[in-house]
Amino acid sequence: MASLKGCVAVVTGASSGIGEATARDLAARGATVVAAARRADRLASLASSVANVHAFECDVTDVASVQRMVDGTVAQFGRIDILVNNAGIGLTGPAVQVELEDWRRMVDVNVMGVLNCTHIALKHLVEAAAGPRGVADIVNISSVAGRKALPGSSVYAATKFAVNAFSDGLRQELASKHVRVSIVAPGFTKSEFIEHIRPDLLAKIRASLEAMPAMTAEEIAETITFCVTRPAGVSVSDLLVRPTEQER
């Protein structure tokens, strides 16, 4: 894979799981990584353990917070070459049992969070693409649920379908500006993701979730790194990555 030395990458949802693993992997490839998330203590621990990772507390649903993070990144490091929109939640469960607020939170984080970060960072990505590297990258983390809705995850699936549509439309708009837009859609992955589910619902489905074949966060991070280390003339638009034993 190509080195990312000299590149500045922003990774949201970087305090655990796929986001943390991605921050570590991009830094290992030479990138300067801004790890953004709400849990400042987790970010501080990550930044202290990886030399090229820098913590920035950020709530992707708060436009002012995202603006501060992007402005702070550019002020300190001069550019943004890579944006990984990873922050997301999945408050799944039967529609008749979940709260409307759970649905609203998923839309706020999974859809508006992606839009907020992309909109505010976009001009910097376009500027970076015009530089020596000749390309910039946006990687949006979707899900296998963005391809097929299943009972209990209808709204989560709707948010990921939205991410897919936004990503492909944006890809077409930005192609001539040399800003690549990639979708990475993981299947079941070991992370803290299930802990977002309400405790009463989680208690009913935990055993079935824990029995499912799962990938590691590091395996998905490697997929994200693959996308952003392609030659400038190659764009990986859409990758669906499942555990080998996952049937749907």
Image: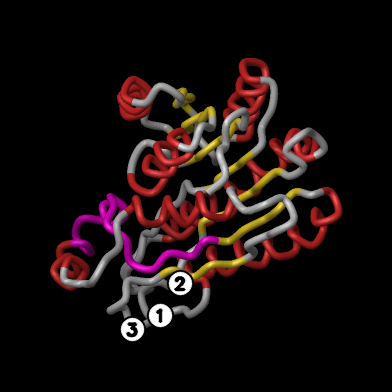
Question: Tag 3, which secondary structure?
Answer: loop
| Spot occupied by residue 83 in the image (x, y as percentages of width and height) | 60, 42
Question: Tag 2, which secondary structure?
Answer: helix
Residue 197 visible here: no
Residue under the point 79% across and 49% down: 178
Query: In the drawing, does residue 138 fall left or right of residue 171?
Result: left
Specify the amino acid type for callout 1: Leu
Mark 2 Cα shell of 10 Å, populated few (<14), some (14-19), many (≥20): many
Please tell me whether residue 18 is drawn above or below residue 38 in the rendered image. Answer: below
| Residue picked out by circle 3 | 247
User: Where, by quadrant of the figure, is residue 45 drawn?
Assistant: top left
Specify the amino acid type for callout 3: Glu
Q: Quadrant of the C terminus?
A: bottom left
Residue extending furthest right?
A: 176
Residue under the point 33% across and 83% down: 247
* Real-space CA distance between mark 1 and mark 2, rounded to the nearest whole angstrom: 7 Å
Question: Tag 1, which secondary structure?
Answer: loop
Q: Is residue 163 magenta?
A: no
Residue extending furthest top?
A: 76
Q: Are marks 1 and 2 in contact (CB under 8 Å)?
A: yes
Residue under the point 62% across and 32% down: 7
Which of the marked residues, 3 or 2, is nearer the chain's N terminus?
A: 2
Mark 1 Cα shell of 10 Å, populated few (<14), some (14-19), many (≥20): few
| Residue picked out by circle 2 | 145
The residue segment tinted magenta is 184-202
Specify the amino acid type for callout 2: Ala
Residue 89 visible here: yes
| Residue picked out by circle 1 | 150
